[in-house]
Amino acid sequence: MRTDVVVIIPCYNEDERLRCTVESVVAAGYSVIVVDDGSEREAWAHVKTLPVHYLRHCINLGQGAALQTGMEYARRLDVAYAVHFDADGQHDVADISRFVAALEQGQADVVIGSRFLRPEDIRQIPFGKRILLRIARIVNGLCTGCWLSDAHNGFRALNRRALERICLTENRMAHATEILSQIKSAGLVLKELPTQVRYTAQSIRKGQKWYNSLNILVELILNKLM
Amino acid sequence: MSIHPIQLILLGGIAISLVLAVKVLRHQLMGRLFFLAQFLVGAFFVLVPEQTEFMAKWVGVGRGADLMFYLFIVFTYMSGFCVLAKFRTLERTQTRLVREMALGNVRFGGEKP
């Protein structure tokens, strides 16, 4: 098991898919931090027999808050690399080694996955979501100065330097834009690598709604003003 | 200068608001000054309402009542903004508390030997 790499999996009201996801990450040889973001029924029941570090928010704060809690705990574990990974099985465990390798080779401080670097990955994205992500890319670029191909990909790998410098204050989905802003202001090197996201009916139903983009934009504006 | 009943009612209302605001904002000097400014401006225009016409003409507004309405809108937006900022501070404090509780109660999974 690679104890220098920890995979942070935030979750909220996940079912057995959480266990499948955690099992696959553990089987790949990585340490896992599960952050239960105030689920109505504790996620502990799904993962207690697996070798994980389990933290729980007593109330639902949002994915950004859960990731920040995971990162603060990862700092205490003294790991070299931390990976952000979705709980619903959308991300591919096999990509973790490729992302971490890029960090180990010194290519970047932060590696973020992109669904728009390979045609076969783009084809997997539902059409409506593809349009939304294209618009979000422009908003992200204007707000942060970071022009990525994929505006909101939750699959990220950070080295120790990035782990210590990034401190998310956006509790909900605006954290994905805030992290880019902090990467830029901290002078961290950012790289995108292709990754596939597996969409199921359940993940699409649970995923972001189009109007959340407006909420994110308002949150970013308010954060800049206050 | 004769005092009309409506002036007494308005002065009383804004005086009560000032007392409550100062009481609630016990250690917040800027908040207290903000509400004190509102009280002083409000009391001034209640006691000498004809000055609203003079002020309105000076700043290019048609009527004194219109000027009062515009000032009311500005103060309302500023107050709303202050409340929103306070909510965000409270949210951050709440997040910090919830996070510390989570970090202090970590559980470790895995088969027990």
Image (cartoon, grey):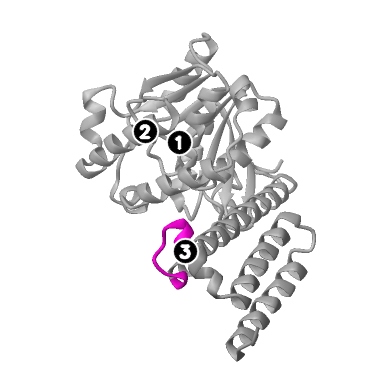
Work out which quarter of the rendered image holds the C terminus of chain B and state it. Answer: top right
The residue carrying pointer 1 sits among few (fewer than 14), some (14 to 19) or many (20 or more) residues within 10 Å by Cα, namely many
Q: What percent of the width, then of the height, locates residue A53?
A: 64, 40
Residue B71 visible, this angle: no
Q: Let me know if residue A90 is in the magenta part.
A: no
Identify the mark at residue A151; answer none if there is no mark. Answer: 2
Report helix, strand or loop for mark 1.
helix
Residue A64 to residue A61: above or below: above
Q: Which residue is at a point 26% across and 42% down the rendered structure image?
A: A129
Circle 1 sits on which residue?
A177
Mark 1 and mark 2: Cα distance apart in space: 8 Å
Q: What percent of the width, then of the height, locates residue A25?
A: 50, 32
Circle 3 sits on which residue?
B56
Q: What percent of the width, then of the height, locates residue B57?
A: 45, 62
The amino acid on which the numbered mark 3 sits, given as a three-letter code, is Ala
Residue range of the region highlighted in magenta in the rendering: B57-65
- Sequence order check: which comes first, mark 1 or mark 2? 2
Q: Quadrant of residue A122?
A: top left
Residue B101 visible, this angle: yes
Mark 3 and mark 2: Cα distance apart in space: 50 Å
Q: What percent of the width, then of the height, locates residue A99?
A: 46, 20
Q: Which residue is at a point 63% across and 66% down the rendered structure image?
A: B41
Please identify the residue farthest to the right as the structure is shown. Answer: B27
Assess whether mark 2 and mark 1 are in contact (beta carbons under 8 angstroms). yes
Foreground residue among B4 and A15: B4
The residue carrying pointer 2 sits among few (fewer than 14), some (14 to 19) or many (20 or more) residues within 10 Å by Cα, namely many
Report helix, strand or loop for mark 2.
loop
The amino acid on which the numbered mark 1 sits, given as a three-letter code, is Thr
